[in-house]
Image (cartoon, rainbow, N blue to C red):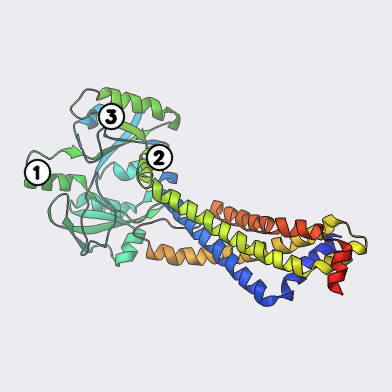
Amino acid sequence: MFELILRFAVRNPLRHKLRSVLTLTGIVVAILAFGLLGTIVSAWYAGVNAASDKRLVTRNSISLTFSMPLAYADRIRAIEGVTDLSWENWFGGIYKEPSNFFPQFAVEPESFFRLVPEFRVKPDELQAFMRDRRGAIVGRKLARRFGWQIGDVIPLKGTIFAGDYEFVLRGIYDGARASTDENQFFLRWDYLNEKIKQLFPGSENQVGIFLIGIADGREAATVSQRVDANFRNSLAETLTETEKAFQLSFVAMTGTIVKAIQIVSCVIIFIIMAVMANTMAMAARERSSEYATLKALGFRPWVVGALVYAESIAVALSAGGIGILLTGPAARVVGGKLDNIFPVFGVAPETIQLQWAAALLIGLVAALIPARQAMRVKIIEGLRQAG
C-alpha cells in the first residue's frame, strides 16, 4: 500500500508539467524569501547571541549619550566579584564618505582585548598597537572591505569629537567564532582623551561605558546591584546589566522592524499555501473518476485521501529542498551587499529547520480540503464523469 501511494505521489505531478513547474517555482521563491527574511532577523540578534555571560556593561543610568567619570574605574575594581575592567567611548568618525559607516570605539588598550578574547589579535600586532598612540586595530571583514593593510594610514573625520584624525593600522583581528563581528574599528582611548583635552578643556577623562569581567555568570545580577549601589545618589548614577541585556536594548529600538519582517515572512507562506491549495483542488477535481475507480476496486477512502496528501507533500518538500539549497548562496550575495549593516549574515540551523517546517505545513494544509473532497467522491458519480 505504501509503495502504491509513493508511486502516485511521484507520477501525478508530472501529468501536468507546466502547472507543476509553476507551482514548484512559486514554492521555491516563497521558501527562499522566508529563509532570507529569517536570516535578516537572525543577523539582527547576532550581537545578542555572541554576548558573553561573564561580562557586564555599566553605563550612565540616564542614557548612553551621557558619560561617566574615569574615576569610577578604581571604585568598580574594588567591588566584590569584579575580576577585570575596561572602558570605551563611541568615536563616530567618517571615512571619506558618510556611506562608509562602521562601528568605531576608543578602547583602553591594555585591558580591552584581554577582556574580549573572541577578538583574536596576533601578539606582535597587539604590541605594535600598544606602542603607537595613533594605532588602530580593525576586524578582518572591515580590512577586506576597504583593502587596508598593516601600516596603512586611515583618515577619519570626527563628528562627535570634531577634527581630522589619522590612525595607523597596527593590527587586524579575527573572530573566534563565525558569529563574531569582524567589522569594527578600535583606536586608543588615551589618544582620544588627549585630543578631547586640547579641543574641549574640562571634558576629558570621561567614559561612555565600563566593561566589567566577572568569574561566574550566575553572579551577574548580584555584582550589577553592587556596582549601581556604589554610585547611587552620585552626579552620574549608573545602570549595570549583562552584555546580552545591553545588546538587546539596541534590538528593542528596532523591534517594530523585526516584527514587520516576521509578519511579512508569515504572509508569504500563507499566500503560497493558498496557491498550492488551489493547484491541489484542480488536480483532485480532474481525478474524480480515478478516485471513484479506486473505491470501486475496494480501496478505502483513507487511501484516496492519502494519495492527495502524498502528492501535495512531495511537491512542497521538493520545492522546499530546492529553496533551502538556494538560501545559502543567496544569503552570501545579500550579506555582501549589507555587510556594513549586518556584519554577521549567515543562515542559522534554526532558519533551515523553519524552512523545512514551512514546506511541510504548505503541503499538509494545501491538501486538507482536496483530500476531504476526494474521500467523499461517490463511485456512481465519479464513474459517470469518466464515461
- Element at badge 3? helix
Q: Position of residue 147 (x, y in %)?
A: 30, 67
Report which residue position mark 2 lands on: 244
Label 2–label 3 contact, CB within 8 A = no
Q: Residue at x 50, y 67 (%)?
A: 329
Mark 2: give few (<14), some (14-19) or many (20+) Cα within 10 Å.
some
Q: Which residue is mark 3?
A: 77
Residue at 87%, 75% in the rendered image: 387
| Numbered label tally | 3
Q: In the picture provided, is 38 more to the left or to the right than 20?
A: left
Give x and y (percent) for residue 54.
Answer: 40, 36
Q: Which residue is depicted at the point 81% across and 57% down? A: 376
Q: Tell me the distance, in whole angstroms, between the alpha carbons under discs 2 and 1.
A: 33 Å
The residue sitting at the right extreme is 297
Decide which of tag 1 and tag 3 comes sooner along the chain.
Answer: 3
Which three-letter amino acid code belongs to the residue tagged 2? Lys
Q: Which mark is residue 197?
A: 1
Q: Looking at the picture, how far across and down is residue 276, in whole percent?
A: 64, 63
Q: CA distance from mark 1 to mark 3?
A: 25 Å
Left or right side of 61 for 312: right
